[in-house]
Image (cartoon, rainbow, N blue to C red):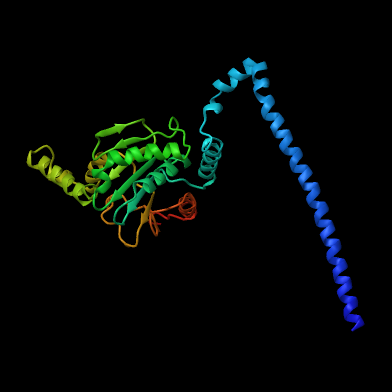
Amino acid sequence: MALLYGLLWRLLLLLVHVNTALVSWLRVRLRSWKGRLWERAVAALLLPVALAGFPDQHKKLNHSPDATANPVTGNRGDGRRARWLSDGKALEKLPVHVGLLVAEEEPSYSDIANLVVWCMAVGISYVSVYDNHGIFRKNNSRLLEEILRQQNLLGVDGSKYSVEFLSNGTDKHNVVSCRPTVKVLSPEDGKQSIVQAAQQICRSVENKERSSKDISVSMLDVLLRESKNIPDPDLVLKFGPVNSTLGFLPWHIRLTEFISLPSHRDVSYDDVLDALQRYASCQQRLGQ
């Protein structure tokens, strides 16, 4: 019994020492916090006096570009732009033309706009957007507005990464600048464009503008490339569960690398970068 009482007495002494140490620590912290609060209060009171005493400095602050920058996306936007540009330069090979093939119902304009802006930011020159229902083609103005809005939200400098928006054929609509180029495609640009090119050749033979002996694959190839006015896609990112190209430029994708992603909704920049890294590491033997 005496041993039990002894253990209890030692436990009580230990608790007393712990309590004393805790109280001492709290007192020190409170003094430190009070000191910091007092310093901040004094600094807040002296700041107007300091600015009034240096009018030239005050004017510089007011007219500095950084002073009018968005406090939310300013410095963070600079960091992201630097990272995107660095990521693009670090790739062993960067596609010139990336196609975004949406094989899902009810496409998200904001997510597609994010994808376009990210592609532009890493240095890709051409981006084509395709869905087999032609939704983006019918609403290309809305997509352009969303792209410009996402440029601002993501902190991308519009003067460096502006958009030239092309519709079908060589007609240009909603032109903002010459590079990079965004082209909206629909099924009309697929098999239908091949049919139209073949009809054009047949009419030229019928009108005796050329001989039937002149008809060749290269002639058809020239006509189809003139109608698109953009290089063949090097990489196509396909979004959705459908394992099909859904009529995406069948004449132009013989050397195109396809990478499938589950969905274009809530897609992240890291998803896009991973796809670009996979493309950069793949070996294209080009029939060899």
Q: How many marks?
A: 0
Q: Is residue 117 above or below residue 254?
A: above
Q: Nearer the viewer, residue 184 or 209?
A: 184
The quadrant of the image that shows the C terminus is bottom left
- Left or right of 220 on screen, residue 18: right
Residue 32: give x, y in percent of width and height.
Answer: 77, 43
Q: Nearer the viewer, residue 261 or 69?
A: 69
Q: Is residue 40 above or below residue 285?
A: above
Q: Nearer the viewer, residue 260 or 66?
A: 66
Query: Residue at left 64%, top 22%?
Result: 48
Residue 25: give x, y in percent of width and height.
Answer: 81, 52
Outermost residue, bottom side:
1
- Left or right of 111 on screen, residue 92: right
- Left or right of 88 on screen, residue 102: left
Q: Is residue 114 above or below residue 284?
A: above
The quadrant of the image that shows the N terminus is bottom right
Residue 166: give x, y in percent of width and height.
Answer: 29, 37
Query: Residue at left 17%, top 43%?
Result: 214
Query: Residue at left 73%, top 35%?
Result: 38
Residue 161: give x, y in percent of width and height.
Answer: 43, 35
Query: Residue at left 78%, top 51%?
Result: 26
